Image: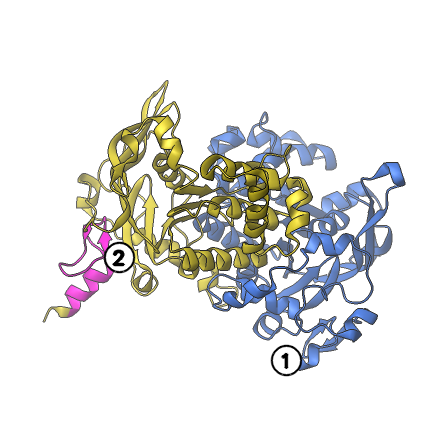
Amino acid sequence: MPVLLEAKNISKSYQGKNRLFGGSLVKVLHDVSLQLQAGEILAIVGESGSGKSTLARQLVMLEQPDSGEILLDGKPFQSVTAIHRQVRMIFQNPAASLDPRKRVYQLLEQPLLNLTGLSGSEREELIYRTLDQVGLNNDQASYYPHMFSGGQRQRIAIARALILNPQVIVSDEAVSALDVSVQAQILNLVMDLRDQIGMSWLFITHDISVVNVIAERVLVLYAGRVMESGPVKEVLENPAHPYTQRLLQSVPGAGDSDRLVAVVQMIPAAEAQAMEYTGCAYRHRCLLADQQCVKSEPPMISLAGRSVACFRAKSML
Amino acid sequence: MANRDCLLAVECLSVDFETRRGSHTAIESVCLDVHAGETVAIVGESGSGKSVTSLAIMGLIRKPGVIRSGKVNFNGMDLLALSSCQRRQYLGRDITMIFQEPTVSLNPSFTVGYQISEVLKLHLKMKRTECRKRALELLHEVGISDSLRCFKSYPHQLSGGMNQRVMIAMAISCKPSLLIADEPTTALDVTVQAQTLALLRQLQKNNGMGMIFITHDLSLVPDIAHRVLVMYAGQIVENCSIDVLFTGPLHPYTEALLKSLPAHHDKQGERLSTITGTPPRAGETITGCHFHGRCSYARERCKESAPKLIAALPDDPRLVRCFYPLAANSKTSAGRP
């Protein structure tokens, strides 16, 4: 399959809050690379503070990365409007990302007005067709967002992303705020859209059990670095990175959670990220870390069908 | 069910909310028992009345909410009959609660240490130095290694998981006999969630307290609970022990919830099963079974009369609110010649 969206060695830093003393730069993304193929769902998993959302913001050009480049169809990003047509984003909380004072029709019309030159009747036809695609009916176009349930609101958000017929949709924790039964409906819709119109998705989530159901490939982020990436089947069934393994053990019902009590005193992800250190980013929480992990940062290696950044990867398999 | 040796016995609790458009029933004849050392999970979608149940037990229902009927017996004493002044002696000491969003429930303008000490000072009448010593012990007990630094920190300086540990430390500070945890891990990362669950389980084992664990995530339940109550539209629809929940749910709603869990789905790319329709809105009047509109097994009788929460089989401890419970059906039909 051709590569549709490609990110090469993206880094991003933000100015620290402590302005009085100059404010240190906090590096949030460290040389992150990814490839999204046409018609696939690529999942990005990680804890809060791992840089998932920052990565999404770079990919839809809400922000400019400090270094590295992003290619769409092999060409670098040119204008913001072109990118906003081709790469659309869905946010976590639809109640907050939909303007409460606009009707659904207006919400869906806005991107068409901004980015296309379609006439009124063409816009109308497209809006009704897109609503139908996400499972809402035409009457609901005149409703306000508050009149919908959480799952329906997320459908509106998906419709708003779909309406420009983009090449890629980036969804940031799109199902985290939903009940399980509603979450299942939205996940089915995502899979339907991929199968019916070949939509490519970059699906950001913290829930590894969701990844297992919908994605073909997965990328595990920790402290702004890619820890492991590859086909879901290989990575989740046979993790080569201790962090991936830890994530899998944390899934409720995995059974091994009593062991986790022993490691609770370790440094949380956000703190590890801000600290100055050498070596592997995960070594503070890793049970396998030794002198080598402190001295140098593990390079990304190819192993058993996936890429992994760990010195211990071979012994993990 | 026998009510003796019960730590908490809630009988037929109903809560209404009075609005301009009339009175809406939030929960309807909720009955539940919690024994010492037992964890009871309450599971349901948003709006099913899980949190209202816990607030009613704590006596925290405020206007426009009204407790219509019911009794809350805690150690043989009716909590609802007490004045708020009398009730306050028990709350925070014998019955404590952990809320969903730890960063919001802690006071941002005081240090964590001060907030834990406050509880000790109020309920156990400890002196300042004693408070400090005990607070540090508590922080250590909930797995915070650098307890002195944490003691001096403000909530914003700590991560979500650490704040939830602080909340747990406050909740167990007076050795409560009942802990109500309302979605304690929903706002946390999966790795932190697993740790928090393990911590709660360990503390419960050590202190022998009863626990009510409220969650919308059915997949957490086997990790922590002994018994589970499934709520739908303000009613308990199923009450069963954890061992049988995953093998043979009785209520169609429980079955549908289980099927929609991604974790219980092995095949990649295959569609998840969903529950069609939406739960009834607040104030909507429903005749018959509350679930009949979304139930794939519904028959005529379900639309006309409302089922009661009864034992599915004569010698089965499981309770279900359904005319045609699932596993019971298959058993009886299998038993027929």
Residue B250 image label: 2
Point 24% across, 62% down: residue = B327
Q: Secondary structure at mark 1?
A: loop
Task: Name the residue nearer the viewer: A108 or A269.
Answer: A269
Q: Which residues are magenta?
A: B310-334
Coordinates of residue B103 in the picture (x, y in percent): 59, 40
Q: CA distance from mark 2 to mark 1?
A: 41 Å
Which residue is rendered at x = 68% and y = 36% of the image? A111
B265 up-or-down from B286: above or below:
below
**Number of numbered discs visible in the structure rendering:** 2
State left or right for residue B272 relative to residue A99: left
Quarter of the image holding residue A130?
A: top right
Residue at image position (66%, 54%) is B146
Q: Which chain is yellow in the picture?
A: B
Label 2 neighbourhood size at 10 Å, few (<14), some (14-19), many (20+)? Answer: many
In the displayed structure, does residue B323 sit left or right of residue A123? left
- A301 falls in the magenta region: no
Callout 1 crowding tier (Cα within 10 Å): few <14, some 14–19, many ≥20: few
- Say which element carries label 2: loop
Quadrant of the rendered structure where residue A114 is? top right
State the residue position of label 1: A317
| Tint of chain A | blue
Where residue B52 appears, as percent x and y from the top left, is: 38, 36
User: Which amino acid lies under the numbered mark 1 shown in the image of this protein?
Assistant: Leu
Subunit of label 1: A
Q: Position of residue A227 (x, y in %)?
A: 71, 66
Q: Which mark is residue B89?
A: none
The furthest residue to the left: B337
Q: As displayed, is residue A209 above or below residue B211?
A: below
Q: Is residue A297 above or below residue A150?
A: below
